[in-house]
Amino acid sequence: MTAGGFDALVPVTDPDALREQEQAGAALADAVRELLDATVRTRLDPAQLHAAIPAVREVTESLLADAADGPRGLEPSSDGRMRVHGNPMVGALNPFAPPLRIDWDGERAATRFTVGAAYEGPPGCLHGGIAAAVLDQVLGVIPSSIGLPAMTATLDLRYRRPTPLGELSATAWLVERDGWKLRLEGELTDAEGEVTVSATGLFVVPRVAREHLGTPTGDAGEFAPPAG
Ligand SMILES: CCCCCCCCCC(=O)SCCNC(=O)CCNC(=O)[C@H](O)C(C)(C)COP(=O)(O)OP(=O)(O)OC[C@H]1O[C@@H](n2cnc3c(N)ncnc32)[C@H](O)[C@@H]1OP(=O)(O)O
């Protein structure tokens, strides 16, 4: 299964229409992601760069003809999950997102993804903040996958070696549960299979969510929330 999101709080009335909308939005995000990459990599001369701007602005204006006033927040998806489609790591509608597609097999959350020029920090390598965001997201999928939507309380990272841009993978697993607190670990790995960053995170189900978790949702397995 592809992890992420939460069981829908409201039923989706027309999943086919919603799927069509999601697919079109994701295709647009793919195209803009190519534009983002091209914008970073282009070596056109100044006149050529200025010449490209009106066309980009025209597309922007056309998209704003019908747009949300601000962030989209949590929305129902065609698969019955609630998702933040603008999430900068997994959001299908966000061109900045690689995007990560995170699988949860009941024991591990895992993703393989490719990062290019738009994510560069040290020359040729992944920006450390992006590595942190990837690991935060991959660790963060586990609580919601076991029915305990939680937020990052602490995230400790060890940058073991530079992470080259290109194909990467990340995995995370649950180490320990203590009531509403989950201790998770994860790793970012380069194409050669070398661990470049390792992470330990404490995720806490926020007070407001605890009040709504009398019954676990999703694949809670043995990790049912404590009573009270
Ligand atoms: C609804 C879920 C949405 C899920 C979205 C997934 C997002 C993916 C990951 C993210 O990027 S989240 C964004 C970054 N994180 C944040 O913005 C979190 C900001 N902090 C908070 O909102 C709250 O501080 C937090 C939810 C982490 C905890 O506040 P609460 O008021 O809900 O918890 P409370 O104070 O009752 O503490 C519960 C337990 O956690 C412990 N705790 C809380 N924060 C801690 C901390 N920072 N370090 C260590 N322990 C901590 C606390 O001591 C206590 O332990 P005990 O039960 O043993 O007494």
Image (cartoon, helix red, strand yellow):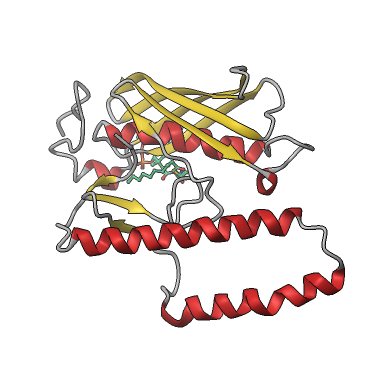
The image shows residue 185, relative to residue 128, as above or below, that is above
Instruction: Answer whether residue 73 is visible to the viewer in this image.
Output: no
The image shows residue 32, relative to residue 105, as above or below, that is below
Between 148 and 124, the residue placed more toward the observer is 124
Instruction: Answer whether residue 216 is visible to the viewer in this image.
Output: yes
Name the spot of residue 66 as percent of width and height, x first.
Answer: 41, 79
Quadrant position of ligand 1: top left
- Location of residue 58 by image quarter: bottom right
- Quarter of the figure with the N terminus: top left
Between 227 and 8, the residue placed more toward the observer is 8
- Quarter of the figure with the C terminus: top left
> Residue at 27% across / 45% down in the picture?
6
- Location of residue 78 by image quarter: bottom left
Image check: 12 left or right of 103?
Answer: left
Name the spot of residue 139 as percent of width and height, x first.
Answer: 43, 31
The image shows residue 47, relative to residue 228, as above or below, that is below
Image check: 139 left or right of 121?
Answer: left
> Residue at 20% across / 36% down in the picture?
218
> Residue at 81% across / 71% down in the picture?
48
Image check: 153 left or right of 17?
Answer: right
Name the spot of residue 8 as percent of width and height, x first.
Answer: 21, 51
